[in-house]
């Protein structure tokens, strides 16, 4: 488990973002330390996917700063961001493997684009990473031939092929049966322990979150409700957090007119 | 009335935004083609060749068939019209100019817009829906360099090449029908065509084809990147890209024809 004394690998300061005229994140602050697994948890519409997009540098925030490995990505040039991305790995919810390439070619892609390695070496490295995720021997298959769990694991292999320092997972357990989801949880823990990665996981799967988290950040309606260990989150008296933990339905009612107004505002 | 004006204004703003986006992507595409190597992010030659195969080589049979048919149709119409003046033999001149200046580039442009422009929009749109474009970005792979630049380069090479091929197929079609109808030998037809045609005539068609190639790629790409809403969105983008590309090609052709023949 990581110590919070160390300098953060990822730090967010007063992050405010908008979608159209609607403010989505209202001054988010958080820090993820080296070797830590940080879970970003929240219900639907809490802003966790939006937060992830900005952490990945896929959007320009209205205000605030995001420091990754000491660099403020909100002010980096395209070339600086390009270099920084070599130290970041991302496993998307649906895998996002390039469907026109084999699994092996997908895993080799970052090596092909960022290193001058020869083809044979890239193939060996890709095979090694696929073995890490228990997909050794699957390199010649197309993504369409894989199951949902296999696609996610292949996406992890592609994300770790450059040995990134910081790894992001977007809803790793979503749409998977409990056994496959548990395998992915084990894989995330293995990446932290064996490869000393700092890991950020965005999820709403409580069981998975509590199993792998060093700390949890709970997000609700664009605000951070709390950041703490699993025990601290369990002990929280916050009503929204307790609703989330105990799966209590929200009492918020919304009229059709208000719903349509929100939609058109976006 | 206010509603109509509002809609008109909204559409105008959207069209201007789209034009600006298209132009920015085009500039960035050329930037990567020319400067990619200096930034250690070259446009991959194998990708360009793969696109050239899809856009160009695979389209040869259909380009030949359509261009040959256009040549035959021009010969039929030309002979029929000129018969009234007893000048059927002059049909060769009409076919030569029409094919090289107009029909060669136009039929190739329309065909490639329908065949490859739509495929490009569908491919990029599907990648957008499946988060593959985001995946490229977070891997530090610029989507414009990786997806657009190879397609642009391949299209700029293959559309003029296909246009030249289309010219030859069209002239050949005209020669076959003129031979059957007028008893004109192939050698005589070819000699007469070479005699009347100048380099400028061929170049006029080829210049147009370069513009058409750019239109096809950029319209396909802009619509692909703009996809929202899953498979239905991909379908809409594909249809829109074909309709817009063909419309722009025909309008651009008219403008070029006007200025190049003054």
Image: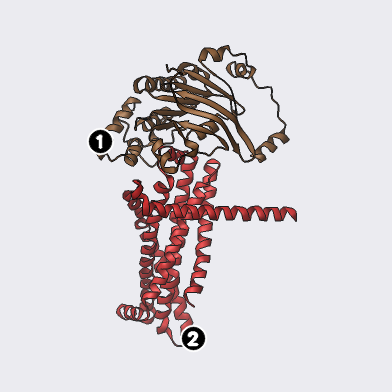
Disc assigned to residue B84: 2
Label 2 resides on the chain identified as B
- On the image, the x and y values in percent for residue A143 come to 39, 36
Label 1 resides on the chain identified as A
Looking at the rendering, in which quadrant would you find the N terminus of chain A? top left
Tell whether label 1 touches label 2 (CB within 8 Å): no
Tell me what residue is drawn at x 35 percent, y 66 percent: B165
Please name whichever residue, A209 or B236, is drawn nearer the observer in this view of the structure.
A209
Instruction: Give the answer, above or below, for where A166 lies relative to A241.
Output: below
Let me know if residue B42 appears in the view: no
- On the image, the x and y values in percent for residue A47 come to 57, 30
Chain A on-screen colour: brown
Mark 2 residue crowding within 10 angstroms, few (<14) / some (14–19) / many (20+): few
Tell me what residue is drawn at x 68 percent, y 53 percent: B7
Of discs 2 and 1, which sits in the foreground? Answer: 1
Mark 1 residue crowding within 10 angstroms, few (<14) / some (14–19) / many (20+): few
A169 sits to left or right of A142: right
């Amino acid at each position: 488990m990581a110590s919070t004394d160390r300098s953060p690998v990822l730090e967010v300061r007063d992050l405010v973002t908008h979608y159209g005229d609607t403010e989505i994140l209202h001054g988010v602050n958080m820090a993820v330390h080296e070797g830590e697994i940080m879970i970003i948890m929240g219900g639907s519409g809490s802003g966790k996917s939006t937060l992830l997009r900005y952490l990945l540098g896929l959007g320009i925030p209205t205000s605030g700063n995001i420091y990754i490995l000491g660099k403020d990505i909100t002010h980096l040039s395209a070339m600086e961001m390009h270099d920084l991305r070599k130290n970041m790995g991302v496993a998307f919810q649906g895998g996002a493997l390039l469907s026109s390439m084999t699994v092996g070619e997908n895993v080799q892609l970052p090596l092909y684009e960022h290193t001058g390695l020869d083809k044979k070496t890239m193939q060996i490295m890709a095979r090694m990473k696929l073995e890490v995720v228990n997909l050794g021997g699957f390199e010649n298959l197309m993504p369409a031939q894989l199951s949902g769990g296999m696609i996610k694991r292949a996406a992890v292999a592609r994300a770790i092929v450059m040995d990134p320092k910081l790894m992001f997972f977007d809803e790793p357990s979503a749409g998977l049966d409990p056994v496959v989801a548990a395998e992915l949880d084990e894989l995330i823990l293995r990446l932290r322990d064996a490869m000393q990665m700092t890991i950020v996981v965005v999820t709403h799967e409580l069981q998975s979150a509590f199993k792998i988290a060093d700390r949890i950040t709970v997000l609700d309606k664009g605000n951070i409700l709390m950041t703490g260990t699993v025990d601290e989150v369990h002990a929280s008296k916050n009503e929204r957090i307790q609703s989330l933990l105990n799966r209590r339905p929200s009492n918020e009612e919304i009229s059709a007119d208000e719903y349509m107004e929100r939609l058109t505002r976006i | 009335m206010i509603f109509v004006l509002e809609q008109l204004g909204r559409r105008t703003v959207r069209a201007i935004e789209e034009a600006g986006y298209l132009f920015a992507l085009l500039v960035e595409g050329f930037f990567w083609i020319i400067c990619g190597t200096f930034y250690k992010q070259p446009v991959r030659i194998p990708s360009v060749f793969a696109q050239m195969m899809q856009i160009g080589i695979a389209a040869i049979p259909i380009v030949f068939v359509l261009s040959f048919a256009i040549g035959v149709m021009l010969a039929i119409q030309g002979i029929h019209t000129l018969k009234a003046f007893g000048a059927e033999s002059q049909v060769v001149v009409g076919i030569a100019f029409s094919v090289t200046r107009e029909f060669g580039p136009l039929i190739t442009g329309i065909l490639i817009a329908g065949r490859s422009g739509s495929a490009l929009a569908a491919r990029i749109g599907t990648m957008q829906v499946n988060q593959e474009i985001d995946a490229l970005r977070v891997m530090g792979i610029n989507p414009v360099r990786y997806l657009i630049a190879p397609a642009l380069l391949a299209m700029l090479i293959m559309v003029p090449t296909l246009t030249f091929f289309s010219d030859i197929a069209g002239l050949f079609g005209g020669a076959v029908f003129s031979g059957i109808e007028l008893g004109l030998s192939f050698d005589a037809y070819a000699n007469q065509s070479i005699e009347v045609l100048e380099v400028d005539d061929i170049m006029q068609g080829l210049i147009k084809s370069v513009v058409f190639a750019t239109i096809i790629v950029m319209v396909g790409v802009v619509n692909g990147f703009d996809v929202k809403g899953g498979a239905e969105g991909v379908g809409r983008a594909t249809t829109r890209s074909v309709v817009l590309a063909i419309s722009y090609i025909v309008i651009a052709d008219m403008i070029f024809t006007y200025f190049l023949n003054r």
